[in-house]
Image: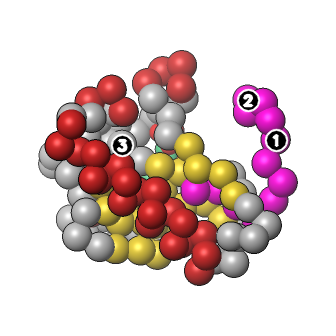
């Protein structure tokens, strides 16, 4: 989608600091990091929210998580731990309507989240 900022990052039209790329997903550093490591992992395919997932997208969701684990290992977070999360719609705090998995690490995470 031409008016989607994450589609434009995936297309290379907007710069981002890429940390991971494969045939289904890519990972790049968040513009406004909330932790020492804050990476967004997105599908190449435009899926607006978690509500819009179709049965045929299940492989993409699996890949989002396996990419997150690989990035966490590369960033030295695996043993200490890290958090992954997907915000959905207004109450979930979603601001960019292209599905993305947040990977946060490098500090102690709080629970419950805000
Ligand atoms: P969410 O609130 O879950 O929709 O998270 C959207 C995240 O996207 C937020 O942490 C800031 C980040 N973000 C927004 N625009 C850009 C951008 O142009 N580049 C990058 N790298 N991150 C962005």
Residue 35 lies in what quarter of the image? bottom right
Could you classify mark 3 by the number of other residues whose Cα lies within 10 Å: few (under 14), some (14-19), or many (20 or more)? many
Q: Is residue 77 above or below residue 82?
A: below
Q: Is residue 38 left or right of residue 9?
A: right
| Residue ID at (81%, 59%) | 107
Q: Which of marks 2 and 1 is in front?
A: 1
Q: Where is residue 109 in the image (x, y as percent from the top left)?
A: 79, 48
Question: Which SS class for mark 1?
Answer: loop
Q: Where is residue 89 in the image (x, y as percent from the top left)?
A: 43, 24
Front-most of 43 and 98? 43
Separation (CA) of disc 2 from disc 1: 9 Å
Could you classify mark 1 by the number of other residues whose Cα lies within 10 Å: few (under 14), some (14-19), or many (20 or more)? few
Q: Residue 114 carries which label?
A: 2
Mark with earlier residue (3, 1): 3
111 drawn magenta: yes
Q: Is the magenta stretch mostly helix, strand or loop?
A: loop
For disc 3, the marked residue is 99
Residue 8 shows up from this direction: no
Residue 74 lies in what quarter of the image? bottom right
Residue 76 lies in what quarter of the image? bottom right
Residue 37 shows up from this direction: yes
Could you classify mark 2 by the number of other residues whose Cα lies within 10 Å: few (under 14), some (14-19), or many (20 or more)? few
Mark with earlier residue (2, 3): 3
What range is drawn magenta here?
A: 103-114
Q: Is residue 114 left or right of residue 58?
A: right
Q: In this view, does 60 lie to the left or right of 40?
A: left
For disc 1, the marked residue is 110
């Amino acid at each position: 989608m031409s008016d989607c900022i994450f589609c434009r990052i995936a297309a290379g039209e907007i710069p981002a600091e890429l940390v991971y790329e494969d045939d289904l997903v890519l990972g790049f550093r968040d513009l406004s990091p909330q932790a020492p490591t804050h990476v967004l992992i997105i599908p190449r395919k435009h899926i607006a929210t978690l509500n819009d997932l179709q049965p045929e997208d299940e492989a993409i969701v699996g890949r989002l998580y396996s990419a997150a684990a690989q990035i966490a290992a590369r960033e030295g977070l695996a043993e200490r731990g890290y958090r992954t999360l997907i915000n959905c719609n207004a109450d979930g705090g979603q601001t960019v309507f292209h599905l993305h998995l947040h990977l946060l690490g490098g500090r102690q995470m709080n629970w419950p989240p805000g």
